Image (cartoon, grey):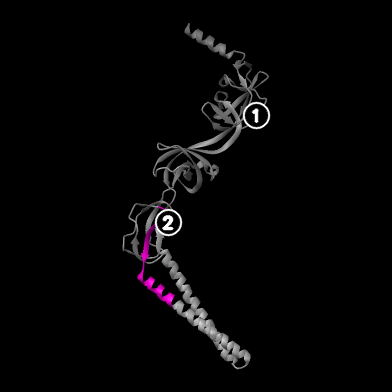
Amino acid sequence: MRKTIMILMVATVLFASSVEVSVIKPKLSKQSLTIEADGVVVAENKNVITSKANGTVKLFIHNNFNVFKGDKIAQIVDERREQKLKLLKAKLALVKKEMKVQEAKLANAKDMYKMGVGSKNGYLNEQVLNEQFKESFQTINNDYKILKQEQKNAIIYAPEDGTITNLADLNSYISYGTTIATFISKKSAVKLFVDAIYAKKLRVGTLVNIQSSYKNTTATIVNVLPTSTNNLLEVMARPKDTLPLNLRISANIELEYLSGITLPKSAIVLIENHPAVYIIKDGVAHIKYVEILKDMVNKILIKNTLDKQSQIAVKNSYMLHDGLAVDVVKK
């Protein structure tokens, strides 16, 4: 008896003349394409500060000290440099005096030569001496300027608000280019780890929504690093608000706006793993393959490849096949 009932039920389905469906017309819409990413808050700038002079380290702060822009951090003291500067300064003053005397001699020799009471050779000799004094002054002045700049560079200031770590030892002797300290900016940045498949869509200036246990805020992408780890790109973003260093965050990145047709998920069917819809025309279902642009919770955004007058099956679309007769019912 049970077997007979089952046969009758199958026969009823097989010989049903049509399937009842509801339909909708395609409507154009725009949806933002967003991706999720994890990240961490880092210092906007973390740089090593190197010495631009040779000498002994004099410190004005201690390790892990918070500084403001322009604060004096250290000075590289070199007594030999300071003595040489004094010597060069004295030489410059002396050569300046000698130049004035020589210029007066040259002017006198020129006047005497014009009046015919002085020789041409005497005048030319004074010209040569005058040029030699100028060259000597220029050489000494160049050496003085270089040493003066080195003396200026020997004083190290904080480039912006931040923290100084890894300070060199007090009174230690260091050479040009040696690391003196590490500077960590007070300004925070967000390092995001984004799937590399979105590399071509990431742009500087793109908006990022940040969620964290500390605070929710927004950020702007400022750099997309060319290297990747485990197929994840490192993307740097500048947050609107300062966030604590090492804070773990999650982010939604708004890549672009997509234009297409939004349909209920019930309208989409999979035919051999290819998304499709059924277009109902003259009471018959016709399969139409589509391209999905964005998968949402209850809806799907597909590429606009449908005629605006198309009747798209929604109710019972999973029961259809190409060429099946259907009954269209009002929703």
Quarter of the view holding residue 178: bottom left
- Amino acid at dot 1: Leu
Dot 1 and dot 2 residues touching (CB under 8 Å): no
Classify residue 289 as left or right of residue 183: right
| Position in image of residue 242 (x %, y %) | 43, 43
| Position in image of residue 325 (x %, y %) | 64, 17
- Amino acid at dot 2: Gly
Residue underneath mark 2: 70
Tell which of 290 and 203 is nearer to you.
203
Give the residue furthest to the bottom.
117
Classify residue 278 as left or right of residue 194: right
| Position in image of residue 67 (x %, y %) | 38, 53
Label 2 Cα crowd, 10 Å radius (few <14 / some 14-19 / many 20+): few
Residue 59 sits above or below residue 323 on the image: below
Residue underneath mark 1: 306
Tell which of 102 and 162 is nearer to you.
102
Q: Earlier in the sequence, mark 1 or mark 2?
A: 2
- Image quadrant holding the C terminus, namely top right
Tell which of 284 and 229 is nearer to you.
229
Label 1 Cα crowd, 10 Å radius (few <14 / some 14-19 / many 20+): some
Classify residue 164 as left or right of residue 141: left
Quarter of the view holding residue 83: bottom left
Q: Which residues are magenta?
A: 68-90
* Residue pictured at 48% horizontal, 45% vertical: 238
Residue 285 sits above or below residue 81 on the image: above
* Residue pictured at 49% horizontal, 48% vertical: 225
* Residue pictured at 34% horizontal, 62% vertical: 58
Give the residue furthest to the top.
1
